[in-house]
Amino acid sequence: MQSLVLRRSRADGKPMESTTWLIGRQPILDREERVWGYELLFRSADDPAMPDATRASADVILGTLSGMGVESLLGGKRGFVNVGRELLHSDALLLLPPQSMVIELLESIEPDEALLARCRALRGAGFALALDDHRYDARFEPIYPWVDLVKVDLTFFRPEELAAEVKRLRGFQPRLLAEKVETAEQFRACRDLGFDYFQGYHFARPALVERKKLPEGGSAMLRLMGLLQEDADTARVEAAFRQSPGLTYRLLVLVNSVAVGSRERIRSVRQAITLLGRRQLKRWVQLALFSADGSRGLDDPLLDAAAVRATFLEELCRLHPRLRSVADAPEQGFLVGILSLLVAVYAVDMQEVVAQLHLADATVAALVKREGTLGELLLLAEHMERQELQAAYEQLGAAGISRARALEAQAAAFAWRGPSGAHAPPGPGGEPARPSLRA
């Protein structure tokens, strides 16, 4: 393991995509030198070669929305994301929360009617727009009225040229940001010229923000995209998420990023899908397809263990006297099972997980303290996994579940994939078979 990023190798010996979100975050300050926002930059410790602009931007957006969470990464400030032409015209861009993000148009984008129309549409959707590394260009005059902020790279100008550039741009009334401010003298000069915001090494170098990346698998994303395109029912979409603990976790982070202010606590994967909505879910998958390389599989023994535990808890919830009359209890049990193994699978801290996710109180109590009915069932599953049978039998007795029924539930959990990927057999009591978790 490297100091920052876990490396894995594919069968052909090539390194697999990094398993860590690594995002550079450089502060943007106002005239009083207070942090106003952050520019978010793609960073990779695995691959010294920078990816293309589309993939880099997609990685940053995915990391912000469903890897780290908007609030966790930005702390209430604005986030600036570089966007090239391809991603700019993708519907996936609308997944970003407009109140939190500024879309920064790369200098490589040529001004034309399509750009003008897209800027109008994005402004109409509530987004703020910025031009990156920009200097006045008459071809952009139709675009300037739709731009909120122009970033001026100081290295493009001699000091005596900068005042004229500011005067030209001020005629279109955007706010101005001085980039690459490296000295106190440059800061004072730019402030005197009327710049509104400032960014550069004089204030701070980009700080690396790191978090474990939970793998979604390119094939799983394509399968999910297909289901959404054919408008599959929620049960089939939910089954696609159940193929991967990483997908499930990222879905929950995403819900909290794009549904800021929701008072509803998440109790199941199905509820998260419903709360997010099909349109937003499609945008997220589109964005993920920009980023995924499709090289990873799902045959990790730890991921298999997570699926077995989740299925076992799902079956136990159907047997428990206090839960079997609760309609969504099996789904709650499955969610607890998936999240409970994130520490082992991805080396993330459980306190960090629950801090990011707007989970139901019973789910939090089960995951953090092993309390409540769900917490007792999670403890039971852990005892059985470790072959601590005496402790397991005592908990079964306290729960009012017979040993025979618990063993049937465990057998059903181990058969979650079914023969050759077929559906798992019916659960105890003749409940309908749940779709296989893996295609």
Image (tube, rainbow, N blue to C red):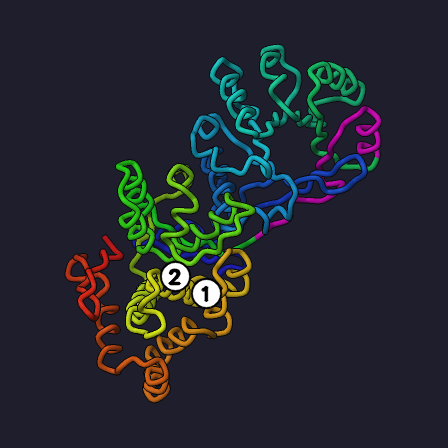
Q: Is 193 a magenta residue?
A: yes
Q: Residue furthest front?
A: 325
94 or 159: nearer the viewer: 94
Q: In the image, which residues are magenta? A: 185-209
The answer to whether residue 405 is above or below residue 162 is below
Quarter of the image where one finds residue 32: top right
Residue 241 position in % (x across, y down): 34, 52
Quarter of the figure with residue 197? top right
The answer to whether residue 45 shows anywhere in this view is no
Residue under the point 26% across and 82% down: 402
* Residue 327: x %, y % from top left: 33, 61
The residue at the point 62 percent across, 46 percent down is 74
Q: Which residue is mark 1?
A: 363
Q: Which residue is mark 2?
A: 335
Which amino acid lies under the numbered mark 1 shown in the image of this protein? Thr
302 on left or right of 36: left
* Depth check, front residue: 384 or 269: 269
Check contact, mark 1 vs mark 2: CB within 8 A: yes
Per the model, the C-alpha gap separating discs 1 and 2 is 8 Å
